[in-house]
Image (spheres, helix red, strand yellow):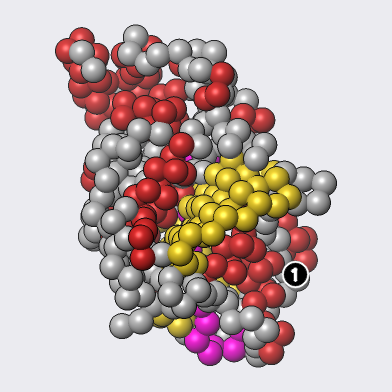
Amino acid sequence: MNETIQARMAEATRLTQEGRLDEAASMIQSALGSSLPAASPSLGSFPNLGAFPNFGAGGTNGPIDVTSQLLRETPQGPAPRRGTGPNLRSRGVRHPSAGNAGGAAGAQTGARAGGRFEARSYSGAAGGRSYKLYVPTGYAGEAVPLVVMLHGCTQDPDDFAAGTRMNALAEEHGFLVAYPAQTNSANMQKCWNWFQAADQQRGRGEPAIIAGITQQVIEDYEVDEGRVYVAGMSAGGAMAAIMGATYPDLYAAVGVHSGLAPGSAHDMPSAFSAMRQGNPGTPMPRASSNGQAGVVPTIVFHGDRDGTVHPRNGDRLLAHLTAGDGSSLKVSTRQGRKPDGHAFTRISYKDADGRPMVERWSVHGLAHAWSGGGHPGSYTDPKGPDASAEMVRFFGQHARTK
């Protein structure tokens, strides 16, 4: 980046801090418009920076302003135990909250009538967020797994739950699902700030808030602490990867859909570059889990027609997870196709016991959307293999040991 562009970005930051967002938007568009090369056809259609595709959203809902996509305002202030679901008995929780997903609401969030979809909130030293918690029908207080789901830009917990249908899987297998909600005050398009250096560290920023929400659910409900997982889509997928890197003592496995490797960016310009080109950035140190040094169990989904987050980012994440340790894992490749849907290639890296430590799903023909997701959730493609079910299957093979 030349000195002129650096000066413009610095001025945009100052304007943002002063609340002069329109002026900041113009400044960023001017800076990035003169610095980013034209996209090749393989990277999707980027007619102009003022219509840059929304990170965390597919192209079907139209373009948004480039600055509102990533510009952060100054802040104010399982394994699901298969077969257990039908046998769970109903019981209240120690700190009940209002909200119920029965009836039509339950159908929209992808769950059967009877489960509770509770509105809750968390506040800690790093800040606070609201979140939704799905409690399956018949939860009786015995220790169950927990899955934390991080939505993409412009989405919210209800939208993400409906699109991924994770609540229906919670009903089937008997686990809790937490959906932290990003705020407009933290990011104008409700993107998790995966690209900000302050939000890529343990004990600070958004990782600390998400970890705090996870701990709050563990404290307020009976949760199997060895079977806590985190997954996300797009900006949420990038943040899920960061959570695995910064809190391997909290999460037993990670699911990343259409996301990026930890450390791929440190500011907005590098975020745009990573999204468009899949550049490696400066990798974060890899954590350890389940006795495998440097390998945090992770399942990765990415569409090879993704024009918002380049598919190369999935390969970068795979390299990040297996670098230095891949030789100790047995690699296998499977190709298949969902009936009347997309074909896929799955690469599995298995340990000596045959457990997949890393899985990389490349879905052929899938754009920037949750594979196998459904309506009325946004940014989903029902023609792909079911990413939610595959994540639950993958999570079920991993438990964190002290």
Residue type marked 1 = Arg
Q: Nearer the viewer, residue 241 or 24?
A: 241
User: Start and end of the magenta stretch?
Assistant: 138-155
Q: Is residue 323 visible?
A: yes
In terms of image quadrants, where is residue 165?
A: bottom right
Q: Is residue 148 magenta?
A: yes
Q: Is residue 314 left or right of residue 375?
A: left
Q: Residue at x 61, y 62 (%)?
A: 390
Q: Give percent across and percent down for residue 59.
A: 62, 29
Q: Give percent across and percent down for residue 290.
A: 36, 75
Q: Nearer the viewer, residue 205 or 93?
A: 205
Question: Where is 391 relative to 67, above or below?
Answer: below
* Residue, far right: 340
Q: Identify the secondary structure beneath mark 1.
A: loop
Q: Give percent across and percent down for residue 31.
A: 31, 14
Q: Residue at x 36, y 27 (%)?
A: 273
Q: Nearer the viewer, residue 51 or 370?
A: 370
Q: Is residue 270 magenta?
A: no
Question: Where is 134 relative to 385, above or below?
Answer: below
Please name the predominant secondary structure of the magenta segment in the image.
loop
Q: Is residue 378 left or right of residue 358?
A: right
Q: Residue at x 54, y 59 (%)?
A: 332
Question: Where is 84 relative to 133, above or below?
Answer: below
Label 1 belongs to which residue?
Answer: 112
In terms of image quadrants, where is residue 9?
A: top left
Q: Residue at x 68, y 84 (%)?
A: 83
Q: Is residue 117 visible?
A: no
